[in-house]
Image (tube, coloured by chain):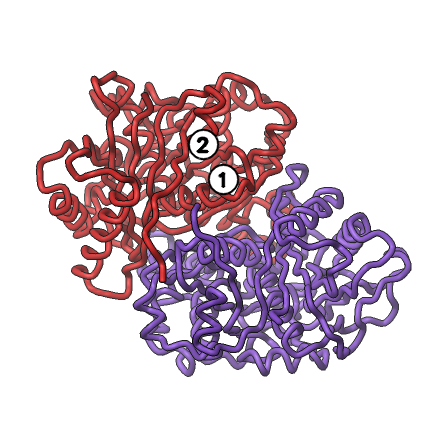
Chain colours: A red, B purple
Amino acid sequence: MTTTVAVRPLTITACGVVSPAGLGLGALEEALRSGVDDYTAPDNPFEGAVDGYPPRPLWAVPDLRVAEHLGRKGLRHIDRFTMLGLIACKLALDESGTALTDEDRADTGVVMATNTGSLVSMLEVGRDTLLQEKPYLVNPARFPNVVTNACTGQIAIRNSLTGVNVVVSGGQAAGLAAVRFARTAIGDERSRRLLVGGVEELSQVAAWGWHKSGALHEDAPVGEGSAVFLVEDAEAASTAGRSGLADLLACEVGYYGAGDSEWRARGLRSCVERALERSGVGADDVDVVSLGATNHRRLELLEDRVVQEVLDRPVPRVRVSEVLGELYSASVPLQIAAVLALWREPADHARTALVTSVGGDGNAGCLVVRECR
Amino acid sequence: MSERRRVVITGLGAVSSIGIGVENFVAGIREGRNGASPIASFDASGFPYVTAGEVHDFEPGAILERLDVERWGRSSLFSAAAARLAVQDAKLDPELLSASRAGSIMGTTAGEAQVLQAAVEQWVAKGLDNVDGRLAAMTPVSQIANSVNHELRLTGDAQTIPTACSASNMALGYAYDLVRTGEADFMLAGGADAVNRACHAGFYRLGALAEDLSRPFDLNRSGILTGEGGAVLLLEPLNHAVARGARIYAEVLGYGVNCDARHMVNPDAPSIAECIRIAHRYAGVKPEQIDYICAHGTGTPTNDHTEVSAVREVFGERIPPISSIKSMIGHTMGAASAFGAIVCGKALEDGFLPPTANLDKLDPALGDGLDVVPGRARPATLNIVQNQGLAFGGNNVVTIFGRVA
């Protein structure tokens, strides 16, 4: 029934990045070009828990400079996960230059990719039900943090954004789902502009989860971070004379967890091909591929092979998790950010990137990004 | 977007505390059946309140055809089972479905909270390095939709939307968008959640938990009962449904979504009213056309008062009959709005007003002219109905359904 139709591009007009490389796109660019000298070790967020981290590289965001970005008020019960997202949004909104009017804020929404939200906040409650004198003696002021949409709720509250407000979970590929959701919401005029991105937090629980799952290579680092993009309809931005960093073209996803690895490879391949077709971009036009399965056993090779098969020539690859660590549902947003970071250095033509993702759960997809000129 | 199609609901799947399968579930709703019972899924000793709306007779293996039930958590099993039931109910060829551009959008509040709690128990007992590694792959929130795609072998979007207690209305709205715009040909949409210790503790501490019975709109209402289950609807284009002679429960006319952006927990009446107006605008309907409201109706003093105020703001003097099915199945969190949507679909098809159970005395503070359909369902011809979801984080989503003549 369905026909393949061209998509309406979205334009990224501003971008906020919080990562183990530091704050901002500049820090990420430097990390991608020359590495990071000293990574910051993560804290222990669980009061009273004696468990340490598993024996593998763990890269935390160095210094959030919370007060500088968010002020000092109203943060007492906000968890660190939400801080990461709040600061990335703040950086994106600041970078956009013009402050949003009240009318703008009513027309602005939030779409964030994450796995579970703050695992720390959820498990804190879970632990309290076992360790407190009575099982119900959980902290009521922090209980609302357990919902996976706590971060997007706070982003809305602190920025008075009353537009569509949503979280998408899709494992490794969740950021692609966020882009798809954003396109529908903007295409349907549910919000004129959206903060679209993702956030994940490093804790010993997340680190042990990765360690015990066996999904990653033994020495693969686990990281954390958030990237958020202010996006709007490309045509609307251009009509209003607002310049963009890049356009988000087609974004195709699918679930291939019910078959073997060949099934997944074919699935990813069909996503890449559909995304190129719906973007009106040829395989020859692709300048760079930002990969998502880096350090994932088996999937890393699968992703690389599929990209090679479709493009049929050597194209430069960016592996952002090599410098930021494993970022799970924040991967795709930081893969996009990595492309933007590298494009800070000017070129003689408008460049095109593929952002690919394939997760252990079976979700896979591909987004086409084109530099604005 | 070039293509716009009308989208209808042709399959309903329910795994609930008052019945499994849509006929059993809706029979329970119509008679005002009480799904509350003593908590069995965790050790509730030490809690002052020990009642919840659990699904005791759920045997996933009896419904599921593909999923290995040992490798998926309870919430995912709820969603996959409800999806399988919805496809059966739609009498749609599963092979056709899996060969089509089809996927699932599923709402949840706590995802696989029971799996997480099991991990926490192992952690506390034996340390993090001795937690069963298999749990890691079972905990992601995204498993709620993945399980649906896995069970039905769907290769389209598998998207979980964890926006708390309005999540399945958001899922329904987004799935409708995907079918309407031609991004997908069929979508399964709904939600799932499982009763769990952390949620029970949290709502108790917030003072929002009822002791033994959920009594929405009642003078003596005291809060929610935590509930669980899976609720899934099959969406397909109207022309396809007509061509294959499918039973059509209802058409999805549109939805509204907004965010209070004021408070994480307390609902905001003007913002909810605005969300209802947005829904009406997108659905192309006027307040006077709405024949019934399936309320969020949690049964906390604050929610019901705020929600009714918001409805009054939009509807003025004439408020349509408004009821809360949470009085029967408890607050099923991320599945709540999808259960509401199923009831709306059946109410349109069969012609009845779903009731509010457990009502002794309507709270006079809610104002005059309020028909909460106390006790049991009443026969009524309905043409257009609305289904309300409100959530932590201030996320409001209202869906509108119409009878296809």
Residue beneath the point at 75% across and 55% down = B287
Residue beneath the point at 40% across and 28% down = A18
A273 up-or-down from A95: above or below: below
Please tell me which residue lies in front, A349 or B139: A349
Side (left or right) of A27 relative to B294: left
The circle on residue A108 is: none
How many other residues sit within 10 Å of disc 1, few (<14), some (14-19) or many (≥20)? many
SS at mark 1 in the image = helix
Please tell me which residue lies in front, B229 or B379: B379
Q: Where is residue A314 in the image (x, y as percent from the top left)?
A: 9, 35
Spot the residue most to the left.
Answer: A313
The quadrant of the rendering that contains the N terminus of chain B is top left
Q: Nearer the viewer, mark 1 or mark 2?
A: 1
Q: Where is residue A44 in the image (x, y as percent from the top left)?
A: 42, 38
SS at mark 2 in the image = strand
The quadrant of the rendering that contains the C terminus of chain B is bottom right
B402 up-or-down from A15: above or below: below
Q: Residue B34 lies in what quarter of the image?
A: bottom right
Q: Name the residue under label 2.
A: A231
Q: Can residue A130 be seen in this snapshot?
A: no
Please tell me which residue lies in front, A184 or B160: A184
Q: Dot 2 falls on which chain?
A: A
Q: Name the residue under label 1.
A: A186
- Pointer 1 and pointer 2: residues touching (CB < 8 Å)? yes
Which kind of residue does numbered mark 1 sit on? Answer: Ile
Q: Earlier in the sequence, mark 1 or mark 2?
A: 1
Q: Dot 1 falls on which chain?
A: A
B347 up-or-down from A103: above or below: below
